[in-house]
Image (tube, grey):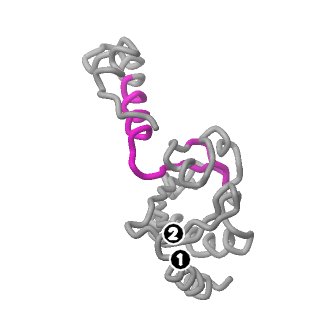
């Protein structure tokens, strides 16, 4: 597991400080800050564009049983248990995201090994007027670990699937 690194370490590694002059120096420093946020986030974060992952942090990939590099370029549908599940979420998400609203929903995804993964998905379009600019998907574990309560988990998944219509 990656240990959090202080921002000072990033400054030294990159040879940059916040007071660096010039647009390129400030932009590079900002990129390092964003990368530090992604790398150290306790939740999974992924960005999609044209229905494909183009960026995700290690936590997002880890929750789904992948290495981050394995997800880049893959269709978002890859992490859903079925095409019907993917389509059902799309019918809920697309109207909200195109109106600039945030999606916040519990949904079942599928790990690389095929096991189901119940999660909370929070998504927001970066630019609702131009959806091709991508949507931001944030996936976080539930507070309750459903694996510890298998019977409850199965019952919850059954109710969720019935409610989702698949």
- Kindly check if marks 1 and 2 are in contact, taking CB atoms under 8 A apart as contact: yes
Give the class, few, some or many, for how many residues have Cα within 10 Å of label 2's Cα (few <14, many ≥20): few
Query: Image check: 45 left or right of 81?
Result: left
Residue at coordinates 61% horizontally, 88% vertically from top-left?
A: 162
> What is the x, y in percent for residue 65?
61, 51
Give the class, few, some or many, for how many residues have Cα within 10 Å of label 1's Cα (few <14, many ≥20): few
| Image quadrant assignment for residue 166 | bottom right
SS class of the residue under badge 2?
Answer: helix
The image shows residue 123, relative to residue 50, as above or below, that is below
Query: Image check: 162 left or right of 126?
Result: right
Residue at coordinates 52% horizontally, 78% vertically from top-left?
A: 153
Q: Nearer the viewer, residue 30 or 15?
A: 15
Q: Nearer the viewer, residue 39 or 33?
A: 39
Q: Which residues are magenta?
A: 29-55
Can you name the residue that lies furthest to the left here?
19
Q: Nearer the viewer, residue 14 or 24?
A: 14
Residue at coordinates 70% horizontally, 62% vertically from top-left?
A: 114
Q: Is residue 43 magenta?
A: yes
Q: CA distance from mark 1 to mark 2?
A: 5 Å
Per the image, the residue denoted by label 1 is: 150
Q: Is residue 134 magenta?
A: no
| Image quadrant assignment for residue 25 | top left
Residue at coordinates 38% horizontally, 34% vertically from top-left?
A: 3
The image shows residue 148, relative to residue 28, as above or below, that is below
Q: Which mark is residue 99?
A: none
> What is the x, y in percent for residue 64?
59, 54
SS class of the residue under badge 1?
Answer: helix
> What is the x, y in percent for residue 123?
48, 60
Per the image, the residue denoted by label 2 is: 147
């Amino acid at each position: 597991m990656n240990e959090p690194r202080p921002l000072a370490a990033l400054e030294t590694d990159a040879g940059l400080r916040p007071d660096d002059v010039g647009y390129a120096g400030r932009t590079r420093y900002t990129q390092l800050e964003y990368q530090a946020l992604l790398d150290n986030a306790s939740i999974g974060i992924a960005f999609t564009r044209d229905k494909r992952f183009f960026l995700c942090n290690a936590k997002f990939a880890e929750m789904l049983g992948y290495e981050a590099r394995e997800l880049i370029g893959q269709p978002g549908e890859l992490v859903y248990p079925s095409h019907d599940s993917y389509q059902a979420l799309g019918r809920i998400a697309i109207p909200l995201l195109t109106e600039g609203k945030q999606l916040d929903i519990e949904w079942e995804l599928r790990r690389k090994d095929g096991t189901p993964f119940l999660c909370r998905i929070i998504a927001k379009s970066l630019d609702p007027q131009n959806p091709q600019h991508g949507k931001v998907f944030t996936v976080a574990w539930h507070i309750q670990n459903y694996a510890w309560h298998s019977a409850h988990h199965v019952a919850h998944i059954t109710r969720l699937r019935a409610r989702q219509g698949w």
